[in-house]
Image (cartoon, rainbow, N blue to C red):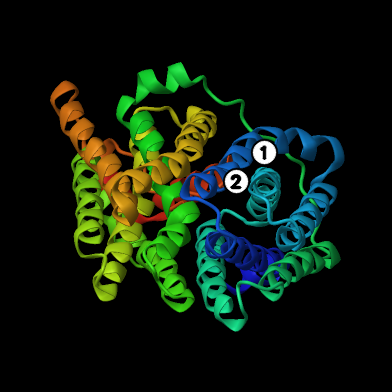
Amino acid sequence: MFSVLSSAWALLLGMMLLQVGNGMQGTLLGIRGEIEGFSTLEMSLIMSGYFLGFLFGSRAAPEMIRRVGHVRVFAALASLISAVMILYPAFTDPYLWGAGRILIGFCFSGVYVTAESWLNNAATNENRGKALSLYMIVQMVGIVSAQALLLTADPGGFILFIIPSVLISLSFAPILLSISPTPAFDTAKPMSLREIASVSPLGCVGMFLMGGVFSAQFGMAAVYGTRAGLSVAEISTFVAAFYVGAVLLQYPLGWLSDRMDRRLLILMVAAGCALGALIGAMLGSIFTMLLVAAFVVGGMSNPLYSLLIAYTNDFLQYDDMAAAAGGMVFINGLGAVAGPFLTGWMMGLFGPSGYFIFIGGLCAALVAYAAYRMTVRPAPSVQDTESYAAVSPGASPAAVYFAQEAAMEASQDDPAEEARAG
């Protein structure tokens, strides 16, 4: 663990500051939009912009890095993020906010590709798994900490927009001043979506549906909170509950994933997510139950991302996994683009409870499709399945490659795993 910190502390610190800034702006815009009188439809379109930009950024970032290098790409994109965040309160117009969200999504995607490929290069075979765990921890610490910072000032003023802008500006200082060498950059060419769909229909459908669920959590949770009449403190706690659930349940579900039929586990976890959404839709007026709903939805939906990637890998050769990962991330991004808009539409029809109705509907659809696929194709034996790799739904393709390498190396080094497989 100390070897990871010594070689990548600057990158991990920078990424935590980036996540604090990103977590603040996502929740803050939802609260400030209500203050400015933006409609639910306007806010849903604004929030969709982030995922649209993220989708295109994940495609463009590798070429930018190849042309000018990690350092320049990271510094340029982080600077743009900082500038947009400080401009939000100066131009409170839904169209300008939407354009800003697209630009921020594009930049964050590029920053993630840059940082995650850099971290992968800095890790060794011996510490790759620890590096990935540390990376996920600092991400979640950053997002949860961001919710607490929202309580430090009035969301109707400028201060809460200045804080994330400053944090983003500070994030690349330790990285750019670090003496760690910048790596060469190379990624596999993604498989076509048709090829991936033929390999794992369940993986593709599930990733698309989970894109909608994740974008509703990350993009529309604060909008839900404002429409439900929650205070700023309650909204911050509500948003944080999603990520606390994700952290606490990711690894137990991953442990189960390597020991049972993954399709059955996907079905069970999606059903649990649907149950959490049902609790939110029916009992969301009770704040304690609302937190329970957010914890269950976050704790179930986030591991589904990793489960679906692991299940798809069960039908791939090792050399094809990295290529398929890029396509899976793209499919998830397509669902994420539509998620906030459809969430806003459902809230327009059913009121605030439409937020949980939308999430529950997507999870129920995954339950039904997983049950259908179990009747069509037999599951691979547990001994023949690939190792589960915990990945955040907001990760870039570079992080998915990184996680898969770490999981494969860990399984090869684990005597118990080797005995189970052979």
x%, y% of residue 189?
61, 25
Q: Are marks 1 and 2 in contact (CB under 8 Å)?
A: no
324 relative to 18 in the view: left or right: left
Which amino acid type is shown beneath numbered disc 2? Answer: Tyr
Q: Which residue is mark 2?
A: 50
Viewer-side residue, 221 vs 319: 221
Q: Which residue is mark 1?
A: 57
Q: In the displayed orientation, state which residue is furthest to the left.
A: 375
Res 422 visible: no
Which amino acid type is shown beneath numbered disc 1? Answer: Gly
Image point (53%, 58%), residue name: 132
Image point (29%, 48%), residue name: 350
Question: Quick one: quadrant of the C terminus?
Answer: top left
Q: Is residue 63 above or below residue 50?
A: above
129 relative to 224 in the view: left or right: right
Q: Earlier in the sequence, mark 1 or mark 2?
A: 2
Q: In the displayed orientation, state which residue is furthest to the front.
A: 37
Which label sits in the foreground, 1 or 2? 2
Image point (28%, 36%), residue name: 384
Q: Secondary structure at mark 1?
A: helix
The quadrant holding residue 248 is bottom left
Disc 1/disc 2 C-alpha distance (Å): 10 Å
Q: Secondary structure at mark 2?
A: helix
Question: Quick one: quadrant of the N terminus?
Answer: bottom right
